Amino acid sequence: MALKLISLGSGSKGNSLLVSAVDGNHKTTVMFDCGFGIRELHRRLQRAGCHPDELSAVLVTHEHGDHANGLLPLAKRYGIPVWMSNGTFLGMGKDFEDVDLNFCRDGDCIEIDCLKITAFTVSHDAREPLQFHLTDGVSKIGMLTDTGQVTPHIQRELSACHLLFLECNYDEAMLEASIYPEHLKRRIRSIYGHLSNAAAAGLLAGIDRSCLRTVIASHLSQNNNLAEYARKAVEEVVSADGVQVMVADQENGTDWIDI
Ligand SMILES: [Zn+2]
Ligand SMILES: [Zn+2]
């Protein structure tokens, strides 16, 4: 059994992540978020060597367009089961007729073949935002984007991961100096906004990192951050542990990463 992960793109213009569990000839692939239009999504899936028919489920973190824009066309066209919170469903306000829709909430464990996926609550300006961690029984992957603060609950859920896909949305000085209007700066910095590089580093400093091998900095702002700043903030906490640090970008996401 082996787990691998690829980001199809990460940032405010669209997010989608695939996790595959490979066991001999059998492969289970699950998508997390579907924030690209259907044509763009097909292009990105093709680049990842994945056909939509291979997807066993799509899990959606929250209703914002950069996470949910392409969901309905994909789920309807290929009959892929969808998981989300009831609040996300209400927040989307869309017609899910003919979609295999399943609800989950904080603490739920969703089993999809050999993958056990756990949902947990985060702090973001959406109706009922969730993030997920998952395991194949051997390795654990944690994902955290779109949260304005790190809570003790989040820290507990993300302890002892082998790989973390972690939001590093903004550099505090760049956001302060940016041309964004004050209300938007306040929204981004609020406890229902996004994680700064420093906040992401703080999360890493506070969790059990004994299994950690890879951190992927993600959901970087194109205006208020630089890949080198996000990487540096993460490396300052984990480089002594020999952890590999990568940055997922908006256009190219990442390559497939073995865990
Ligand atoms: Zn987002
Ligand atoms: Zn969001």
Image (cartoon, grey):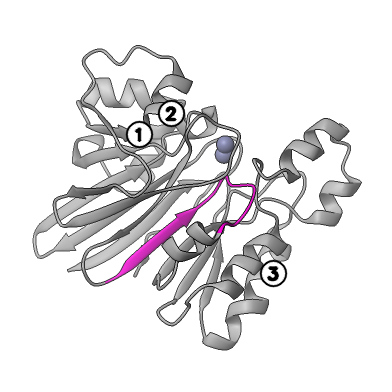
Label 3 – label 2 distance at C-alpha: 31 Å
The CB of the residue at mark 3 lies under 8 Å from ligand 1: no
Q: In this view of the protein, which residue sits in the foreground, 246 or 158?
A: 158
Tell me: residue 81, above or below residue 30: above
- Left/right of residue 129 with respect to residue 117 in the rendered view: right
Q: Secondary structure at mark 1?
A: strand
Which-is-in-front pick, marks 3 and 1?
Answer: 1
- Kind of residue at disc 1: Met
The residue wearing badge 2 is 88
Q: In the image, what residue type sits under mark 3?
A: Ala
| Mark 2 in CB contact with mark 1 (< 8 angstroms) | yes
Residue 65 position, x and y percent, is: 53, 27
- What residue is shown at x 37% (from left), y 28% (from top)? 86
Q: Is residue 143 magenta?
A: yes
Quarter where residue 227 is shown: bottom right
Q: Nearer the viewer, mark 3 or mark 2?
A: 2
Tell me how far mark 2 sits from mark 1, CA to CA: 6 Å
In the rendered structure, does residue 75 fall within the stretch colored magenta?
Answer: no
Check the image and name the residue furthest to the left.
25
Q: Which quarter holds ligand 1?
A: top right
Quadrant containing the N terminus is bottom left
User: Main SS of the magenta segment?
Assistant: loop
User: Label 2 is placed on what type of residue?
Assistant: Thr
- Decide: few, some or many residues near mark 2? Use Cα within 10 Å; few <14, some 14-19, many ≥20: many
Instruction: Provide the residue designation for mark 1.
Output: 84
* Residue receiving disc 3: 233
> Which residue is nearer to you in this view: 11 or 51?
11
